[in-house]
Amino acid sequence: MSEHLMRNYAPLPVTFVRGEGAWLWDSEGRKYLDALAGVAVCGLGHAHPAVAEAVCEQARTLVHVSNWYHIAEQEALAARLTALAGMDRAFFGNSGAEANEAAIKLARLHGRARNIERPAIVVMEGSFHGRTLATLTATGNRKVQAGFEPLVQGFVRAPYNDLEAVRTIAANNPDVVAVLVEPVTGEGGVQIPDDDYLPGLREICDANDWLLMLDEIQTGIGRTGRLFAFQHSDIVPDVMTLAKGLGNGVPIGACLARGPAAELFQPGAHGSTYGGNPLVSRAALTVLEVLEEENLVARAAGLGQRMFEGLKSELGELEGVREIRGCGLMLAVELDRPCTDILQQALEAGLLLNVTAGNVVRLLPPLIISDEEADQIVAITSRLVRDFLA
Ligand SMILES: Cc1ncc(COP(=O)(O)O)c(C=O)c1O
């Protein structure tokens, strides 16, 4: 454990030195099956040859210039992403939190354009939007906020998956200008809202001239079995944020917008030194190409179904298992008790998974896993949960 790193992380006792596909090797030469993918980042697995080649080639050509100049790779990425999402324009930063900061700033400009002095954004209980001051304020988890007060003003909270609560806010708060919401919660424990939730939010936003802003940082880039999770419904958001799977580990965040929201940033309004530089843009473009060439989004849907059914049949009836949830390759086994101890046991069993919200075992495997690897993840997870509850 380094004496020279701040203590904000509590890493498990392992150091990985190499990866390939869904597998990682530690410094002792031990092999692990990765059902976490760097928390929904490495959708194409580790050391994907096409991404590795693109990053190396771009590094040999041009890594960084500055947004003072045109960047062809960034323009190509913006064109591709907006076409895929049905959006108009993109802004690029380096992380999920930074993408959400851009969305929050767009909402405030949208409010100003409507002559609202103190614009407010509806955010949800149990949500996670990042660790910067504005995004931790937007986050619906006191643990993330504690100690960092004073928080940022201009957020109103509603329970997740509760349209009536948002309607009540609409009726009572004329300062609201936007809703920021995850289509499926990630850190909040893989809560999957009712089918009418996003369409209902879309309707409320339309009726009140609010922006519908979707945080697809964890759900995006194929994770849920659609390229973007909103594509499970027939709505389109006004603003969408992406990060994680977009770069397969190369740091990139994106804020996409449509219609008038896409015109709100004018020169000087926002920026990021590294945002969308040639290296990260080339990596993200390659990720999108590979997803398409290898048909990985449909594959994620099929694998997700296979794993969900596997977990259901192995653990569905077990006492202590509250619920099994799945949306593509976002899978969760909610237990009736805190279960972070399972992390160490999983590590010893050669499996990387995650526990979120205290009692939810979460699986976020790469989209490139084979059927056999998917079955192996289900089998080991089921054994670990059974042993843990015994
Ligand atoms: C839904 C969601 N939004 C935002 C973030 C923050 O992203 P980052 O850690 O890249 O700032 C995360 C990270 O877990 C996330 O899951």
Image (cartoon, rainbow, N blue to C red):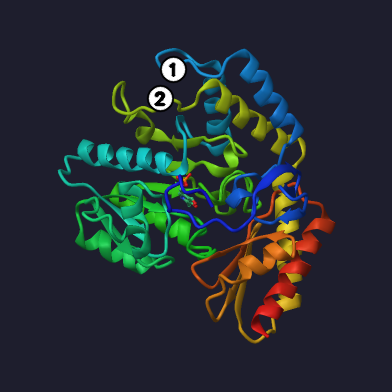
Q: Which of marks 1 and 2 is nearer the N terminus?
A: 1
Q: In this view, does 147 lie to the left or right of 373?
A: left
Tell me how far mark 1 sits from mark 2, CA to CA. 6 Å
Mark 2 Cβ and ligand 1 under 8 Å apart: no
Question: Which x, y percent locates residue 242?
Answer: 50, 41
Q: Residue at x 71, y 65 (%)?
A: 348
Q: Residues within 10 Å of mark 2 (few under 14, many from 20)?
A: some
Can residue 210 be seen by looking at this rendering?
no
Question: Which x, y percent locates residue 196?
Answer: 49, 63
Above or below for 389 versus 287:
below
Looking at the rendered structure, the number of numbered marks drawn on it comes to 2
Kindly give the residue lying farthest to the right in the view shown. Answer: 372
Q: Which residue position holds label 2?
A: 273
Question: Which x, y percent locates residue 32?
Answer: 74, 55
Above or below for 222 versus 204:
above
Mark 1 Cβ and ligand 1 under 8 Å apart: no
Give whichever of 88, 155 is nearer the camera.
Answer: 155
Q: Which amino acid does label 1 sit on?
A: Ser
Q: Is mark 1 on a helix, strand or loop?
A: loop
User: Given contact means CB atoms under 8 Å apart, are the residues at marks 1 and 2 in contact?
Assistant: yes
Q: Residue at x 42, y 39 (%)?
A: 99
**Image quarter of residue 237:** top left
Q: Is residue 157 left or right of residue 72?
A: left
Question: Which x, y percent locates residue 357?
Answer: 49, 67
Kindly give the residue lying farthest to the front in the view shown. Answer: 3
Q: Which amino acid does label 2 sit on?
A: Thr
Can residue 41 be seen by looking at this rendering?
yes
**Image quarter of residue 352:** bottom right
Q: Which residue position holds label 1?
A: 66
Q: Is mark 2 on a helix, strand or loop?
A: loop
